[in-house]
Amino acid sequence: MPGLVDTRFCEENMSIVHAIYSAIHRIATPGDGRASSVSPGYWNHLVRTKILSGIRDVEGNILDVGCGDGLFLIQLAQQNPRARIWAADIDAGNIRQAQERVRRENITSIYFSQQDATALAFRDILFNTVVCTNLFMVMDSLATVRRALSSIDRIRKKGAVVFFDFRNALNPILRLKYKLAPLYDETIKGHNLTRITRRISPQGWQMRICLLLQGNASGCLLLNL
């Protein structure tokens, strides 16, 4: 009938769009990132590389919140052999995949727990470094992001650095990409980085934006004042 939308047709077409998008993501992923079921893609590779450049030879406690299937954990542990690393993820399937990946690499310095990033159960003032790669972008709102940062604020040591990433909406290519995102994904995506830092930064934190490619993506360092 005129005026009616065939929802099944729309769902089938969006499934095709999502499948094509996922395939391109995997093809564009350098190196072993292609084996990741959670964080493939060129931008995620850039984020991991940039964050790893800022975490070298740490001897304290490192937390990876939203560890996914463990790809980044392996790189983190290999680069920081004297660190004690904790990995948390809300998804039990991700935890199992990450544990299996770590077991294959014979790494014993990583401790896993299934936790919600907005209500982390670790004791206060425990971590020297906290990493959240590809995490805040998949949350449903900035309010949820703020709750996660408040939870992280409680468990990090004074002066600890928190690494996380958003895609920059000021980049025209990414702006177009994330305009289409609501068609297949309800999570938050592209944001103006300058504005978002003011909206989510906990009191007493200083945020520094670090662009991976000019205007493309960002990894943000949060420093305690």
Image (cartoon, rainbow, N blue to C red):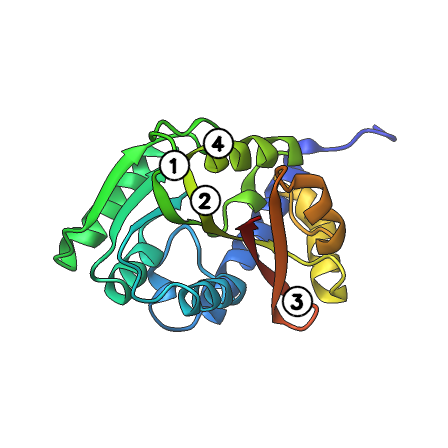
Circle 3 SS class: loop
| Residue named by callout 4 | 151
Taking the spot 41% from the left edge, 50% from the top edge, the residue there is: 38
Taking the spot 24% from the left edge, 65% from the top edge, the residue there is: 78
Q: Residues within 10 Å of mark 4 (few under 14, many from 20)?
A: some
Circle 2 SS class: strand
| Residue named by callout 1 | 125
Residue type at mark 3: give it: Asn
Separation of residues labelled 4 and 1 (CA atoms): 11 Å
Residue placed furthest toward the right: 2
Q: Evaluate whether residue 67 shows in this view.
A: no
Q: Which-is-in-front pick, marks 4 and 3? A: 4
Q: Residues within 10 Å of mark 2 (few under 14, many from 20)?
A: some
* Sequence-first disc among 4 and 2: 4
Residue type at mark 2: give it: Lys
Residue type at mark 4: give it: Ser
- Mark 1 touches mark 3? (CB < 8 Å): no
Taking the spot 36% from the left edge, 72% from the top edge, the residue there is: 31
Image-quadrant location for residue 80: bottom left
Image-quadrant location for residue 217: bottom right
| Residue named by callout 2 | 158
* Sequence-first disc among 1 and 2: 1
- Mark 4 touches mark 2? (CB < 8 Å): no
Horizontal and vertical percent for residue 204?
61, 41
- Mark 1 touches mark 2? (CB < 8 Å): yes
Separation of residues labelled 4 and 2 (CA atoms): 14 Å
| Residue named by callout 3 | 216
Q: How many marks?
A: 4
Separation of residues labelled 4 and 3 (CA atoms): 28 Å
- Mark 4 touches mark 3? (CB < 8 Å): no
Q: Which-is-in-front pick, marks 4 and 2? A: 2
Q: Which-is-in-front pick, marks 2 and 3? A: 2
